[in-house]
Image (cartoon, rainbow, N blue to C red):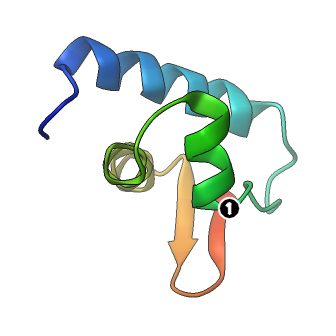
Amino acid sequence: MRGASSADLAELLGELRRLAAARPVGSRLPAERDLAVRLGVGRAVLRRALRELADSGAIRTRAQSGSYVC
């Protein structure tokens, strides 16, 4: 993960967890491009954080569809 430290990733994960927790189960998160702009990070860093959230079971991702709260 070039360009972002572990602390940056941890902070981003916290922001994404709060965003997901504020939405009902099954609801779709905003598009990656919109989230990256809103959170001030690159899409590669955002995708890594989303992958970690998916691995933890907090969200699920579907290709060409988006990320959904679990």
Left or right side of 50 for 59: right
Q: Position of residue 70 (x, y in %)?
A: 66, 55
Of 50 and 55, which appears nearest the observer?
50
* Residue 7, quarter of picture: top left
Q: Position of residue 15 (x, y in %)?
A: 58, 23
Q: Identify the residue shown where x is 36% and y is 55%.
A: 51
Of 37 and 13, which appears nearest the observer?
37
Residue 21, compared with residue 35, is above or below; it is above
Q: Secondary structure at mark 1?
A: loop
Q: Identify the residue shown where x is 45% and y is 25%.
A: 12
Q: Position of residue 62 (x, y in %)?
A: 55, 80
Give the residue at the far left of this rendering. Answer: 2
Amino acid type at image mark 1:
Ala
Q: Residues within 10 Å of mark 1 (few under 14, many from 20)?
A: few
Q: Identify the residue shown where x is 43% and y is 45%.
A: 53
Q: Could you tell me if residue 70 is visible in this image?
A: no
* Residue 4, quarter of picture: top left
Q: Could you tell me if residue 12 is visible in this image?
A: yes
Q: Position of residue 43 (x, y in %)?
A: 42, 52
* Residue 59, quarter of picture: bottom right
Residue 55, compared with residue 1, is above or below; it is below
> Which residue, given by chain and number where applicable, does mark 1 sit on?
31
Which quadrant of the figure contains the N terminus?
Answer: top left
